[in-house]
Image: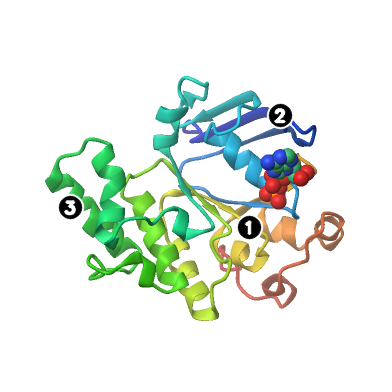
Amino acid sequence: MPEPVLELADVRYRYPTGAEALRGVTFAVQPGEHVALAGPNGAGKSTLVLAMAGFVSAAGTIRVAGHTLTPGSARDVRRHLGLVFQDADDQLFMPRVADDVAFGPATMGLEPEEVRARVGEALAAVGLEGYEDREPYHLSVGEKRRAALATVLAMRPQILVLDEPSADLDPRGRRMLIDLLRPMTSTLMVITHDLDLVVETCRRVVVLDAGAVVADGPVREVLSDRALVEAHGLEVPLRLAQGAPDMQGT
Ligand code: ADP
């Protein structure tokens, strides 16, 4: 087996207010895997992302692309972890789409020619060719979400972490997102409670509840277990209830 691109071992975190958000989370992600992190509100999903990026200092071990996260290494580790926030406005702040996408590669110290190449490549990957001069502020929600994804892709992270990528999207925007994520060869972690999105974009799902992993396995197996999903505040996704094909095409 190749080395995992993400390793979490007994990750624990308690907010200063006393809330025990992570109570010993352990799982690993292999290169190229599409893994969903699902769970009800308050399960600890956002806290886990904050911990993985070193924004909160959790106990236990976190390794990203072979680098162990420590307070001193957080900046380096974040280079390998491409975080796409739920609110695209957190990621888009330049006057032109191309400037936003160029920002990350430029701060990595890449040559202007390489930066330009990466901007073109990332915009093409999200279906936004020709959007270079558009103002991010005036894009639709779906276009903004894809532009935000491009800003992260341009840095070629080892693992892409998408926080609620389908939130606020209309059916067409959601479909475009699924068509974009599904064939991606990069390692993906999709954080969501849109379980139908999980069925269409991921092969594996980790279910988190009350700060602990309560299930980890193939999407069809885990999410069609009605007793399990309902015990953790979720519902069997419609696609599975109706017998529609999943990522495995079964
Ligand atoms: P999720 O993303 O799955 O909805 P969170 O990680 O946001 O879950 O929350 C996990 C737990 O930590 C919850 O009990 C929540 O109330 C608590 N929590 C989240 N953010 C904070 C914070 N900034 N301060 C104190 N407690 C928090």
How is the rendered protein coloured? rainbow
Mark 3, residue position: 116
Q: Residue at x 41, y 37 (%)?
A: 80
Q: What is the three-letter code of the residue carrying label 1? A: Thr
- Residue that badge 1 annotates: 192
Q: Nearer the viewer, residue 161 or 98?
A: 98
Mark 2 or mark 3, earlier in chain:
2
Q: Is mark 3 within 8 Å of ligand 1?
A: no
Classify 10 Å Cα crowding around label 1: few (below 14), some (14-19), many (20 and above). Answer: many
Residue 139 screen position, x and y as percent: 38, 72
Q: Which mark is residue 12?
A: 2
Do callouts 1 and 3 mark residues in contact (Cβ within 8 Å)? Answer: no
| Ligand 1 quarter of the rendering | top right
Secondary structure category for the residue under label 2:
strand
Image side of residue 37 versus residue 1, left or right: right
Q: CA distance from mark 1 to mark 2?
A: 21 Å
- Residue 247 horizontal/vertical position (percent): 56, 64
Q: Please, what is the three-letter code of the amino acid marked with disc 2?
A: Arg
Label 3: which secondary element: helix
Count residues near mark 3 (Cα–Cα under 10 Å), then give few for <14, some for 14-19, many for 20+: some
Out of 182 and 128, give the one closest to the viewer: 128
